[in-house]
Image (cartoon, rainbow, N blue to C red):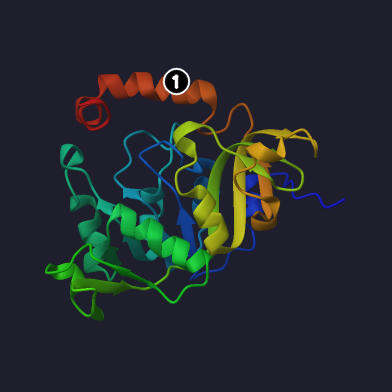
Amino acid sequence: MVNKLCASFDEAVADIPDGACIGMDSWAIAATAQNLIAALKRKGVKDLTIVTHCFIPMIFGEDKAVMPSVLLPQMKKLITPVVGIRHLGGAAFVQEYVEKGLEVEQTTIGTLSSRLYAGAARLGGIYNPVGVGTIVEEGKEKRVIDGKEYILEKPIRLDYAFVSAHKADRLGNLVYKGVFRGDGPVMAMAADFTIAEVDEVVEVGEIDAEHVISAGIFVDRVVRIPEDGLATGQKLKELVYELHKIEPARKLMFG
């Protein structure tokens, strides 16, 4: 029987080359495949293109939580709707890398999801009204459809997707929990190769087929998060508690 379980995060990312385009869902610490990101940093690959939803500076030490921004020194391009948060100093943390050649392509949350879906479905793109009449339309094809202007947004295909799920079986079928679902499923479909980190691994047949969100056909490797790993249940509880104590983060997360 096919077994997609991988022994470690370092093993799971071992063959990712320089120049890879990697999608990783992230809303601060939620839905982030933190252990895979940490392993990618250790590997030291460079010239990466990172596609993510929220790109903000590190709030905690890397022993507690890791976000896509930890990869900044290894990146050549960033595609995201959010670069920095006002309460955390805005986008200043990216500036020195932009000056060194980092390309930043900003989009909107819905547009990013739609472009990923277009990539997953092998569509040629989507016509989107969002951004018409703004700098978003610069350099892009426009069409009038039924009297309304649209911008052509091109699909996003990924070389790799890092997803964080709650449960998996040995075939790679995934179940998500709450907000951790996010755009993980569409990233898995838009990627040539998907690696999932999960809280729990069960035997084939133990997951009700009606509960599977990402089918195993879209998942290539699965790594179970160990008890001392990043983003475990207890650590997330501790981090949320700490967020209440950090004023900028408190405002960001709790208003």
Give how far across and how far down residue 100 sits, in percent. 26, 69
Q: Is residue 45 above or below residue 239?
A: below
Residue at the image position 44 percent from the left and 48 percent from the top: 25
Give how far across and how far down residue 212 sits, in percent. 64, 42
Give how far across and how far down residue 96 sits, in percent. 22, 60
Residue at the image position 20 percent from the left and 59 percent from the top: 95
Residue at the image position 60 percent from the left and 44 percent from the top: 213
Q: Residues within 10 Å of mark 1 (few under 14, many from 20)?
A: few
What element does badge 1 sit on? helix
Give how far across and how far down residue 223 sits, in percent. 66, 43
Q: Is residue 26 above or below residue 102?
A: above
Q: Is residue 251 left or right of residue 171?
A: left
Quarter of the image for residue 113 reads bottom left
Furthest residue in direction left, as rendered:
133
Counting labels gives 1
* Residue 93 seen: yes
The residue labelled by disc 1 is 237
In the rendered image, which quarter contains the C terminus? top left
Q: Is residue 51 above or below residue 234?
A: below
Residue at the image position 80 percent from the left and 49 percent from the top: 3
Furthest residue in direction right, as rendered:
1
Q: Nearer the viewer, residue 124 or 221?
A: 124
* Residue 158 seen: no
Quarter of the image for residue 170 reads top right
Q: Is residue 159 left or right of residue 245?
A: right
Q: Amino acid at mark 1?
A: Lys
